[in-house]
Amino acid sequence: MTVRKAWIVATAAVGAGAAFVMVLVVGVYMVAGNMVNGVGSGTRALAKGSVPAAYQATVQKWGNLCPAINPALLAAQLYQESGFNPRARSAAAAQGIAQFIPGTWATHGVDGDGDGDRDVWDPADAIPSAASYDCSLASYVKSVPGNITENMLAAYNAGPDAVIRYGGVPPYKETRNYVRIITSLEDSFAAPVGRLGPTQQAAGAISYAQTKLGTPYLWGGTGTVGQGGRFDCSGLTQAAYESVGITLPRVANDQYNAGPHPSRGELLPGDLVFFSDDLTNSRAIRHVGIYVGGGYMIDAPRTGAVIRFDPIDSKDYFGATRVTQDGAKALPTTV
């Protein structure tokens, strides 16, 4: 849960806060109306499969709602809030894919799909509502010095009054972490523009993986002594990057968001390569390896096999990630 899910309730209790709520209410519906009328030119196309196919068109469309956001940034917010789970519910009663609390939803929810209702559990409403709320916050803090997107994210987390009072991102640890996380995750949801630079730690990660060649596969293995030093696919990639000081999530589909995504023709040794039976959804990824060049990877393939070199070109090849320190740090521990 983020602070923004609670501050609106407290703010509404005072006169200035009530006025602010009215500004946002008007802003939400003006923004939503503009979107219906085609206003909003956007930037940063989504990376292949980074958003589940069921939500990709909605995120791409509403992520272009105003200059302070873009589709990749909106995707990063949704991933951070719920992991794209439309049934997510927090202990603080935050609901749905965008994690609105009921009071905030009552004020800021919009009928994104035009079916006559506003349903917090329906991503067709919740995703447009998150974008509309972002843009309304951006409009409210537009006169504050600094980066408009960072100020908007800070307002989303801590409330716009705090952003105005401090003249930018307030000195709250949670808020600064939230801004850092979302802006770092943005790159992992965006289709790269131009060629990506190499990762300095890649050679060390490959070197580690090479020392494990011939080790028997173990489902759930992370290389512990109790497991006989054995790994499954994501356990191997996690350990390889841990050896060079980068902490990755435990499972493959979360590791996909640890950095930007090079195309097949731009792969470099050290890139993580991913495989899935559903090529439209990164949440369905089931296998990962470490690219070593020449169309091959080191991977822990399956029960009964050993860690080995395997070709990457197959019908279930999903894509790749160039792991970065900032990208890995931004990933939530659970989604």
Image (cartoon, helix red, strand yellow):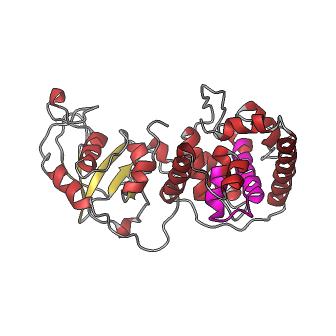
Residue 134 x %, y %: 70, 52
Q: In the rendered image, which quarter is residue 79 located in?
A: top right
Q: In the rendered image, which quarter is residue 117 located in?
A: top right
Describe residue 155's horizontal placement relative to residue 286 as left or right.
right
Describe residue 193's horizontal placement relative to residue 159 as left or right.
left
Q: In the rendered image, which quarter is residue 272 located in?
A: bottom left
In this rendered view, identify the residue nearer to me: 94 or 166.
166
Q: Does the magenta stretch include residue 259?
A: no
In this rendered view, identify the residue nearer to me: 15 or 29.
15
Q: Can residue 51 be seen in this view?
A: no
Residue under the point 62% across and 31% down: 87
Looking at the rendering, the stretch of residues picked out in magenta corresponds to: 126-154
User: What number of labels is visible?
Assistant: 0
Describe residue 212's horizontal placement relative to residue 318 as left or right.
left
Pick out the residue farthest to the bottom: 194
Vertical position of residue 232 compared to residue 276: above or below: above
Residue under the point 76% across and 34% down: 10
Residue under the point 84% across and 62% down: 37
Q: Does the magenta stretch include residue 143?
A: yes
Q: Kindly report the secondary structure that dominates the magenta region of the rendered protein.
A: helix
In this rendered view, identify the residue nearer to me: 76 or 215.
76
Residue 82 x %, y %: 57, 38
Residue under the point 33% across and 65% down: 267
Q: Can residue 245 be seen in this view?
A: yes
Residue 279 x %, y %: 47, 51
The quarter of the rendered structure image containing the N terminus is top right
Vertical position of residue 7 compared to residue 112: above or below: above
Residue 225 x %, y %: 15, 30
